[in-house]
Image (cartoon, rainbow, N blue to C red):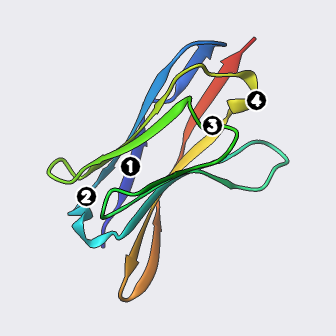
Amino acid sequence: QVQLVESGGGLVQAGGALRLSCVASGSIFSFNFMGWYRQAPGNQRELVASITSGGSTNYADSVKGRFTISRDNFKNTVYLQMNGLKPEDTAVYYCKGQTPWPLSDYWGQGTQVTVSS
């Protein structure tokens, strides 16, 4: 079973940048969809950015123009480059991979991102 491990979170001042990484224990070729989600205290988990196996990307309106998702299939890694961070970006960020057959979701354990004002 593939495991996902996130890293790269931390404390940053508003306007700063972080790059999150999600490394899979196996090949990410099996994932037709990979996404970054976040959950702030008291809020539901929300999709921040996603990328398909074909390279199509999608972003939440709140992060468009600031965040960039990418994947390196040879390194079995998905990245989330976050620029222009705002305090409202503070949350635990999770990586998810989805396989089409059987339809299954794999989640990482999350990495904390805290943006100070």
In the drawing, does residue 2 fall left or right of residue 74? right
Q: Which residue is mark 1?
A: 5
Q: Which residue is mark 4?
A: 88
* Callout 4–callout 3 Cβ contact below 8 Å: no
- The tag on residue 71 is none
* Callout 2–callout 3 Cβ contact below 8 Å: no
SS class of the residue under badge 3?
A: loop
Q: x, y percentage for residue 87?
A: 74, 22
In the drawing, does residue 92 fall left or right of residue 34? right
Foreground mark, 2 or 3, reads: 3
Task: Name which of mark 1 and mark 2 comes first in the sequence.
Answer: 1
Q: Amino acid at mark 2?
A: Ser
Task: Name which of mark 1 and mark 4 comes first in the sequence.
Answer: 1
Q: Which residue is mark 3?
A: 63
Q: Which residue is mark 2?
A: 25
Q: CA distance from mark 3 to mark 1?
A: 22 Å
Q: Amino acid at mark 4?
A: Glu
Q: CA distance from mark 1 to mark 4?
A: 24 Å
Q: Residue furthest bottom?
A: 102
Please identify the quarter of the rendering in which residue 102 is found. Answer: bottom left
